[in-house]
Amino acid sequence: MANQNIDNFRLVVFVPQREFKHQMVLPCILDYAYMSPLPVVCPIAIVDEPLDDNELKLSAQKLSHLILDQSQDQKRKISATEYAVQKFGSKFLLLGSVLSFSPVDLLDNMSSKYIFKKALVCSHIGLSDKTVNENNIMQEKTLNFYSGALANMVLRITYDDKAIECAQWKIGKLHWMPSVKSCGNKK
């Protein structure tokens, strides 16, 4: 019998609006045997302590401005363009859709253990010593949405040498991005 291990993480996550979750199509991959499903969230950073309400609110405002500044049509559109794999900690891989903003730009002044390089709305987590054939991961279309929230999340991963046995999570209070009008729409 393999040894069972448990790792706990405190995260700051972006939670897409509900309509995005209904549009998201899980990738067609053959490597699901060793993976565990996750909630539809985008990990932004691994932190020592959860952010307080004020920090999350200010970060949600900053995210809204960042996305609006990137926009070509004065709409705060967030796109999920392709599926990708990203390292998570020293032992895990995340699988999900890449979003059109950078977590580094959002949390550049926050003290954290790790800020993710890509904004990846996750669907699954697996062990990093397993090989995921990225040619088998396909997203059929670009998904767009216009809102989301930031929150703290605790993630507990139970695994052995071969696979993730269980991923459990708890998501804290959602801090929604302010409306485009309150961000000063550039018309």
Image (cartoon, helix red, strand yellow):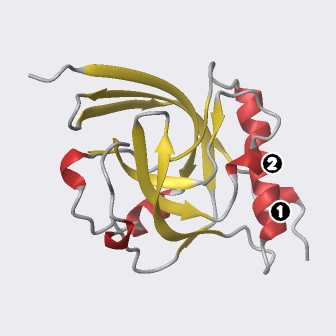
The residue labelled by disc 1 is 181
Q: Position of residue 102 (x, y in %)?
A: 70, 55
* Residue type highlighted by circle 1: Lys
Q: Which residue bears the numbered disc 2?
A: 62
Which quadrant holds the C terminus?
Answer: bottom right
Q: Position of residue 175 (x, y in %)?
A: 65, 40
Where is residue 78, by image quadrant? bottom right
Closer to the camera in the image, 44 or 133: 133
Question: Between marks 1 and 2, how big is the CA–CA gap?
Answer: 14 Å
The mark nearer the N terminus, 1 or 2, is: 2
Q: Residue at x 41, y 69 (%)?
A: 23
- In which image quadrant can residue 161 be found? top left
The quadrant in which the N terminus is found is top left
Q: Is residue 134 above or below residue 31?
A: below
> Position of 137 compared to 116: left or right?
left
Q: Residue at the spot x=78%, y=80% of the render?
A: 73
What is the secondary structure assignment of the residue under circle 2?
A: helix
Disc 2 crowd, CA 10 A, few/some/many (<14, 14-19, 20+): some
Q: Nearer the viewer, residue 26 or 84?
A: 84
Which label lies toward us, 1 or 2? Answer: 2
Decide: is 125 above or below 73: above
Q: Is residue 182 above or below residue 70?
A: above
6 left or right, relative to 42:
left
| Residue 87: numbered disc | none
Q: Indicate left or right for 61 with 18 as reference.
A: right
In percent of width and height, residue 46 lies at 59, 31
